[in-house]
Amino acid sequence: MELCWRGAELTDVPNMQAIADRIHVDLPERPEVLVEKLRLFPQGVQVLCAGAQIVGYGLAHPWMLHRPPVLDAFLTELPGHADCLHIHDVAVLPDFRGRKALPSYMEAIAKLAHAMSISRLALVSVYDTDPLWARFGFRVVMPDAALSAKLRCYGATANYMVCDLGAGAVG
């Protein structure tokens, strides 16, 4: 079955939450946090579909470099002068991994960033996924004390990573 990404809708949130609860057992977020991201920046929230079934999702929004949002916290508003597109989460059910879903998502997010005149992507890598993100041009940023404090809520293996789109990375 072919996989395709589409823009998320409010009715997709329960399916997104079910996937998050399954994949991020140690990093829970309330459904209201997902709803807020969808409300604040709908173009950055996508779901991965296999036919009519939602099998993954991706959340991204404009943000400030080196200041990742705290996990399970409301953003309240987006920064007026964002200098990166922050990829908050990409989750794909295990049975649907390895089918080029992540490369197509990353290509779409890079295009979105370019359209917004944003030249960097940022994320917090969890579950020892640094090598995966490195394949898309992300590099680990050595944290200062403030960044280290923010990363604690993401678990012991969390790393802050940045991708410079001007360097030809992603897609």
Image: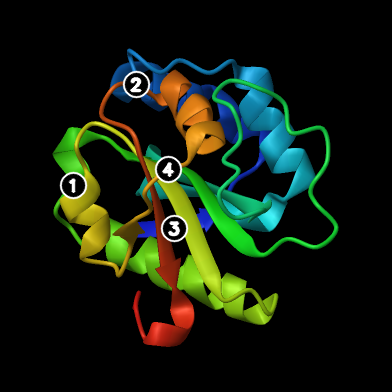
Tell me, for residue 155, which label it has, or none. Answer: 2
The mark lying in front, picked from 4 and 2, is 4
Tag 3: residue type?
Trp
Placement of 156 over or under 57, stated as above or below: above
Describe residue 131's horizontal placement relative to residue 149 as left or right: left
Structural distance between the alpha carbons of marks 4 and 1: 30 Å
The spot of residue 41 in percent (x, y) is 72, 50
Tell me, for residue 5, which label it has, or none. Answer: 3
Tag 2: residue type?
Gly
Describe residue 164's horizontal placement relative to residue 116 as left or right: left
Rate crowding at label 2 as few (under 14), some (14 to 19) or many (20 or more) other CA atoms within 10 Å: few
The mark lying in front, picked from 3 and 4, is 4
Structural distance between the alpha carbons of marks 4 and 2: 15 Å
Tag 1: residue type?
Arg
Structural distance between the alpha carbons of marks 2 and 1: 23 Å
Q: Residue at x 28, y 67 (%)?
A: 136
Tell me, for residue 22, which label it has, or none. Answer: none
Q: Residue at x 42, y 60 (%)?
A: 162
Structural distance between the alpha carbons of marks 3 and 4: 33 Å
Viewer-side residue, 120 vs 35: 120
- Lower sequence index among marks 2 and 1: 1
